[in-house]
Amino acid sequence: MIYDRYAAVYDGSGQIRFALLLAAYLDEVLRRHPVAGRRMVDLACGTGTLALMMADDGWLVIGVDRSAAMLAEARNKREHAANPQAVELCQCDMRDVRGVLGPASADLVTCTYDSLNYMLSERDLAACFRSAAFVLAPGGLFVADMNTRHFLEHDWGSCVIHELPQYVQVEQSVFDPQLDTVTMVLTCFVGDDERGYERIDEVHRERAYDDLLVTRLIEETGLTLEASYDSFTFEAPIATTQRIFYIARKARGQGALADCA
């Protein structure tokens, strides 16, 4: 299973940088697209960096992730957080959050850092959007990002090597234009010359979706798309955009969806 043994080295490998950038960007997003409350659900929360940072900023946060190993890392970090009681962590598949999260229980729902690209079918992607709509209170905001086909096909390197002290990560990737899918073989070596190295192997797959399809699936849940932005900007996406942020709102007076499966 992905993000199993890799979870322990995830932050140290540099992946934490995205969450740090996202926290600052999200602050500006919320200035432009404000919400009334301070309850947040972070779908696919991973090691909990964003959830903990939002809690430090006064939010009550529920972090949801399917990976027990990633949640274990998040719980370890929560023990040393400034406001640990403000963060709840739950193991759950983001395609169906019923029974774990209540309807209309969040003013903000996030799902970021490629998480939606891991949904390899339109049905699974739509289920994630329904989960977000189910959890959102009327007037609440959904903020999500997705890698574009341009990025997966042209900008995602076929072989990338990251070297850090006591850590080497090799990413070997192939894009399938028929399936709009990139397959990455991730190989990590953790350790040193004296103690030896542990090898970690995982296979990650991400699919790109047409922007118009994503917009349609979001709006079919009853959410209204307020904006889509080129990654970490407030500009409209262009042909070479690598990542799109989608900002959608649940109408005031709209109840929770009965079915998010």
Image (cartoon, helix red, strand yellow):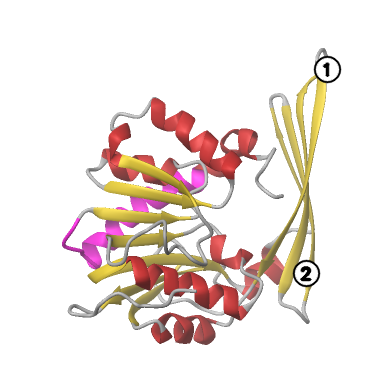
Residue at horizontal 29 percent and vertical 35 percent from the top: 85
Judge whether residue 234 can be spotted in this image: no
Residue 107, picture quadrant: bottom left
| Above-or-below relation of 176 to 161 | below
Determine which of the numbered discs, if any, sits on residue 175 in the image.
2
32 part of magenta stretch? yes
The part of the chain drawn in magenta is 17-37
Between 16 and 99, the one nearer to me in the picture = 99
Q: Residues within 10 Å of mark 2 (few under 14, many from 20)?
A: many
Between 241 and 222, the one nearer to me in the picture = 222
Q: Residues under labels 2 and 1: Cα distance?
A: 35 Å
155 part of magenta stretch? no
Q: Position of residue 65 (x, y in %)?
A: 51, 51
Q: Position of residue 226 (x, y in %)?
A: 31, 78
Q: Amino acid at mark 2?
A: Phe
Residue at horizontal 44 percent and vertical 41 percent from the top: 49
In what element is the residue under mark 1?
A: loop
> In the displayed structure, does residue 198 sit left or right of residue 258?
right
> In the displayed structure, does residue 235 sit left or right of residue 237?
left
Residue at horizontal 62 percent and vertical 33 percent from the top: 8
Determine which of the numbered discs, if any, sits on residue 193 in the image.
1
| Above-or-below relation of 137 to 24 | below
In what element is the residue under mark 2?
A: strand
Judge whether residue 59 can be spotted in this image: yes
Q: Residues within 10 Å of mark 1 (few under 14, many from 20)?
A: few
Q: Amino acid at mark 1?
A: Asp
Residue at horizontal 44 percent and vertical 65 percent from the top: 144
Q: Position of residue 73 (x, y in %)?
A: 53, 34
Between 34 and 60, the one nearer to me in the picture = 60
Q: How many marks?
A: 2
